[in-house]
Amino acid sequence: MDAVQQEVTDIFLRTKALLQGHFVLRSGLHSGHFFQCAQVCQNMPAVERLGTLLLAKLGGVHYDTVLAPAMGGLVIGQEVARQAKARFIFAEKENNVLVMRRGFTLKPGEKVLIVEDVITRGGRVVECLEIVKRMGGTTAAVAVLVDRSAGQAKFDVPTFSLLEMSYPTYPADQIPEWLAKIPASKPGS
């Protein structure tokens, strides 16, 4: 683990954003670990530092607008946009599908950075990629705090993460006995 990954891990542990137990993830998979980014996102100095570290990872990626899926990506997306002095917009659920509302639009070819807190399969990022394409924009990159997929979630644009964690996940019909003994919770993201 390099120094940045260690610092990010320390931030998540210090803010009690990395939990252990039995969790049902948004993807429907079960896990013994959960990143509750809402816990870290209530600590603005931690959010500011994570935003700084994420921006450093992006290097020379150029974009005009940051798009985040609600709820998870809102705080870190806004912080990345604030530090980059970029416009910030978000997509939100309507009938369990992410859509742009509130008058948000993209200009043809507008370069967009998608920022999310945690990905496991990357479903919300895929929805944001489709939104950008449908609205005529261009996705410059995807930036996430934590990639739980250990690099398995693939997108058609450069993807950057501060931390890759490969905690095992299990389909509901394949939960190991030790995990099944712990009552499952669905903490939300």
Image: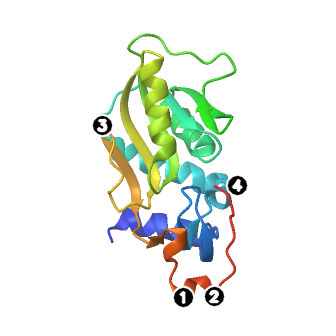
Residue 77's image quarter? top right
Residue 171 x, y percent position in the rendering: 49, 68
**Crowd rating for badge 2 (residues with CA inside 10 Å; few <14, some 14–19, many 20+):** few
Front residue (pair 154, 178): 178
Give the foreground label among 3 and 2.
2
Q: Could you tell which of marks 3 and 2 lies nearer the N-terminus?
A: 3
**Crowd rating for badge 3 (residues with CA inside 10 Å; few <14, some 14–19, many 20+):** few
Q: Would you say residue 64 is visible in this rendering? A: no
- Element type at mark 3: loop
Residue 156, numbered label? 3
Give the foreground label among 4 and 1.
1
Gap between marks 3 and 4 measured at Cα: 32 Å
- Element type at mark 4: loop
Residue annotated with mark 1: 177
- Which residue ends up furthest to the top in the rendered image? 108
Residue 181, numbered label? 2
| Image quarter of the N terminus | bottom left
